[in-house]
Amino acid sequence: MHPNAQARLRELLQTDAEALAEWQENFKLKDDPRVTRVGAFLRRFSLDELPQLLNVIAGDMCLVGPRPIVEDELALYGQYAHIYLSTRPGMTGLWQVSGRSDTSYRRRIALDCAYVRRRSIWLDFKILLKTVLVVFGRQRGAY
């Protein structure tokens, strides 16, 4: 992150209507002014996710599950919030291997709910395998 990252974001959102719309829809930006070149590299190869292994070891997260969200995002789940809250978040999940940042937030919610309803060891194995292919393959989508 750049110094004064929040100020950079605030200024961009106040001056760029397109960026504001993207932020309101996805809670992230493809061209986020807060992210340094090193940060962009880490994100591209999902290396920024590795510290979450500590949360998995501590039992706060699973390897596979719905993507962690911030409190403000829970409202977007609407009637499906209870489904999201019924399981621990994961480092990877159905959304992450099904298009990731290239999918809409509505699709993300549908994928999170589908995972919770269908979760099994076999599905987790398939998601973990696909995660390796996404991270080391040509599919990127992370930003």
Image (spheres, rainbow, N blue to C red):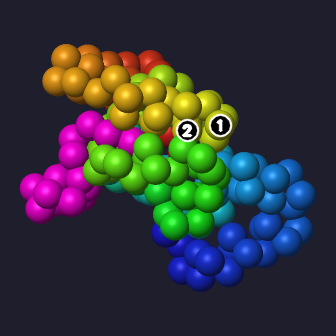
Point out residue 91 in the picture as x, y percentages from the top left corner. 30, 45
**CB of mark 1 within 8 Å of CB of mark 2?**
yes
Judge by depth and name the residue closer to the eye, 89 or 87.
87
**4 relative to 18 in the view: left or right:** left
Residue 135 lies, with reference to residue 5, above or below; the image says above
Magenta residue span: 51-67
The label shown at residue 106 is 1
Q: Residue furthest left?
A: 57
Q: Which residue is mark 2?
A: 109
Mark pair 1, 2: CA separation: 5 Å
Q: Secondary structure at mark 2?
A: helix
Residue 119 lies, with reference to residue 28, above or below; the image says above
The structure residue drawn at horizontal position 55% and vertical position 58%, both measured from the top left corner, is 74
Say if the magenta span includes residue 102: no
The structure residue drawn at horizontal position 46% and vertical position 36%, both measured from the top left corner, is 112
- Residue type at numbered disc 2: Ile
Judge by depth and name the residue closer to the eye, 7 or 86.
86
